[in-house]
C-alpha cells in the first residue's frame, strides 16, 4: 500500500495512438520495484498511483517503451509547499517566523508594575532583576514564589508582592508598608526649653507652668514651660509640658567667593548608539572618546507596531565631557554668584515656619574676592521638649492623712 499523502496519480499514453499492453507495462514496473496501486486501462491509456520516487522510475520506463507519462494529481506537504519553491522571501519569512516564535516561547517581553506609589519603578525593576526576572529571561526557569519571598526580604518598605505571568507578559503587584504612627509619650514628664537666645514674642501654654513672660529674653537651654507644678501645700507633681513658643532671634551667615578660580564646563560630547534586545544592549555606532568626568543622559525609543511593543528598542547614549578651566570674574559677577548662594540658603533653611523680619548685608572686598555677611532677624519657634528624669517618693499613707488634716484646718 502507498499512503495517500505520498501518492502521485499518473497517466501513461502511447505516442503514436496505438493500443498499449497494460500487462507488459505492469510487469516491467514490478520488475523495477515500482510500487503502484489502482492501475486501470481506459480509452487506450493507463491510470494509477505511484510514489514520488516511483514516478521518476515510471517516467524513464515509459520513455524506453515509447510511451508518454504525465502526473495528474499530487498529494502531501512536499507537493503543497513545492508550488512556492520559487518564492524565496515567503519561504524565508515563514521559517524566520517559526524560529522567532520558538525562541520567544516563555521569554519575558513586557513587565507591568502596579500597586505602589511610594517605591520607584526603577527600584522594583532592580529587585526583579536580582531574582532573575528581566526582559528576555525565560520565565519558566524562575520560581515566582521564591522570588516574592526574596524581594520582601531585600526591601523593608515592601509589605507584600505578587508576581504572575501570562505568556510573555509579567504582572507585578506591590503593597507598601504603612508608616508607623508617631508615638508621643504624653505622660512622660518634660520641660519645654529654649533652643536659642531669643526674645519671647508669643506663648500658648496647654499644659505645664510658664516661667518667663512675653517680652522677656531667654538664653539657649532656659526652661520656658516647666513640667514641675507646685501645689499650695508645698508639694510638686510632674506633667508633660505642652505649648507653642514663638521668639525673635538673630542669625548670621557669611558667604565668600574669589575673583579667580576654576569652573566646570562642557569640553565635548560623545555619543553611542545601541540596539536593546531583551534588555541587552548591542552598540553599533560610537562617536567621540570618553575620557575623564562626564554628565550622562540617554534616550530610548522602543520598536512598536500599533499598540504592540516589541522587546527591541534603539538607545542613544550621550556623554557630555566635563573639564576644569581657570576663570577670572569681575566684582559684579562675584556679587551675582553670592546673591544666588544667599537666595538658595534662604529658600532651603529659612522658609519652613520661619519669618524673616529684617535682613542686613555687610560686604567686605579684598584683593582675592568678596565676602558678604548677612544678619537675619527671624521670628519662629524656639521651644523644644526635654524629658525630666524625676525621682518618685514611695507612697506614705500617714503622710497623706496629715495633708488632709492641714487642708481641713485651713
Image (spheres, helix red, strand yellow):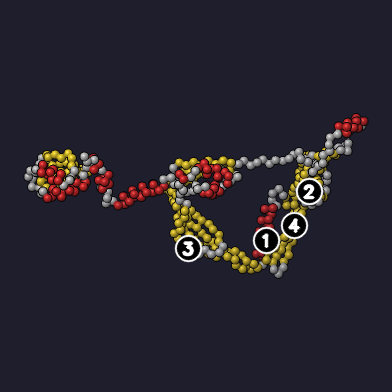
Q: Secondary structure at mark 1?
A: helix
The residue positioned 72% from the left and 49% from the top of the image is: 354
Report the residue marked by disc 1. Answer: 338
Query: Which-is-in-front pick, marks 2 and 4?
Result: 2
Q: Check the picture and name the quadrant holding the C terminus.
A: top right
Does residue 285 appear in this view?
A: yes
Q: Which comes before the other along the chain, label 4 or label 1? A: 4
Of 398 and 277, the residue lying toward us: 398
The residue positioned 37% from the left and 49% from the top of the image is: 99
Report the residue marked by disc 3. Answer: 287
Q: Secondary structure at mark 2?
A: strand
Q: Secondary structure at mark 4?
A: strand
Q: Position of residue 355 (x, y in %)?
A: 72, 50
Report the residue marked by disc 4. Answer: 252
Report the residue marked by disc 2. Answer: 194
**Crowd class of label 3 (few under 14; some 14 to 19; many from 20; radius 10 Å):** few
**Res 233 → quadrant:** top right
Relative side of 140 to 262, left or right = left
The answer to whether mark 3 and mark 2 are in CB contact below 8 A is: no
Q: For the view shown, which residue lies furthest in the bottom direction?
A: 367
Q: Position of residue 390 (x, y in %)?
A: 81, 42
Q: Which comes before the other along the chain, label 2 or label 4? A: 2
Q: CA distance from mark 2 to mark 4?
A: 18 Å
Amino acid at each position: 500500500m502507498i499512503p495517500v499523502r505520498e501518492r502521485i496519480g499518473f497517466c501513461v499514453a502511447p505516442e503514436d495512438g496505438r493500443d498499449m499492453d497494460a500487462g507488459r507495462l505492469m510487469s516491467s514496473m514490478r520488475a523495477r520495484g515500482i510500487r503502484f496501486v489502482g492501475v486501470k486501462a481506459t480509452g487506450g491509456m493507463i491510470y494509477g498511483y505511484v510514489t514520488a520516487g516511483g514516478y521518476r522510475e515510471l517516467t524513464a520506463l515509459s520513455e524506453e517503451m515509447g510511451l508518454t507519462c504525465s502526473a495528474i494529481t499530487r498529494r502531501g506537504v512536499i507537493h503543497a509547499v513545492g508550488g512556492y519553491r520559487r518564492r524565496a522571501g515567503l519561504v524565508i519569512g515563514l521559517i524566520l517566523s517559526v524560529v522567532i516564535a520558538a525562541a520567544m516561547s516563555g521569554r519575558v517581553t513586557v513587565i507591568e508594575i502596579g500597586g505602589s506609589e511610594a517605591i520607584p519603578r526603577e527600584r522594583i525593576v532592580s529587585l526583579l532583576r536580582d531574582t532573575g526576572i528581566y526582559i528576555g529571561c525565560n520565565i519558566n526557569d524562575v520560581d515566582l514564589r521564591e522570588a516574592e519571598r526574596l524581594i520582601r526580604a531585600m526591601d523593608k518598605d515592601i509589605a507584600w508582592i505578587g508576581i504572575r505571568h501570562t505568556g510573555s507578559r509579567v504582572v507585578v503587584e506591590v503593597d507598601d508598608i504603612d508608616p508607623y504612627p508617631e508615638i508621643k509619650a504624653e505622660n512622660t514628664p518634660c520641660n519645654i526649653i529654649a533652643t536659642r537666645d531669643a526674645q519671647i514674642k508669643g506663648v500658648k501654654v496647654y499644659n505645664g507652668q510658664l516661667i518667663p513672660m512675653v517680652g522677656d529674653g531667654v538664653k539657649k537651654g532656659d526652661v520656658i514651660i516647666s513640667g514641675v507644678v507646685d501645689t499650695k501645700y508645698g508639694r510638686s507633681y510632674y506633667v508633660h509640658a505642652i505649648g507653642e513658643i514663638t521668639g525673635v532671634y538673630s542669625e548670621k551667615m557669611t558667604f565668600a567667593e574669589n575673583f579667580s578660580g576654576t569652573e566646570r564646563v562642557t569640553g565635548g560630547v560623545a555619543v553611542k548608539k545601541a540596539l536593546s534586545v531583551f534588555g541587552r544592549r548591542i552598540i553599533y555606532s560610537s562617536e567621540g572618546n570618553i575620557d575623564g568626568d562626564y554628565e550622562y543622559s540617554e534616550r530610548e525609543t522602543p520598536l512598536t507596531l500599533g499598540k504592540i511593543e516589541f522587546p527591541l528598542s534603539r538607545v542613544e547614549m550621550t556623554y557630555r565631557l566635563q573639564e576644569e578651566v581657570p576663570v577670572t570674574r569681575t566684582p559684579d559677577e562675584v556679587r551675582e554668584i553670592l546673591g544666588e548662594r544667599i537666595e538658595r540658603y534662604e529658600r532651603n533653611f529659612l522658609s519652613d515656619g520661619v519669618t524673616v523680619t529684617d535682613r542686613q548685608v555687610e560686604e567686605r572686598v579684598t584683593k582675592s574676592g568678596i565676602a558678604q555677611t548677612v544678619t537675619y532677624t527671624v521670628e519662629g519657634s524656639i521651644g523644644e521638649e526635654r524629658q525630666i528624669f524625676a525621682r518618685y517618693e514611695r507612697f506614705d499613707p500617714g503622710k497623706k492623712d496629715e495633708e488632709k488634716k492641714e487642708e481641713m484646718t485651713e
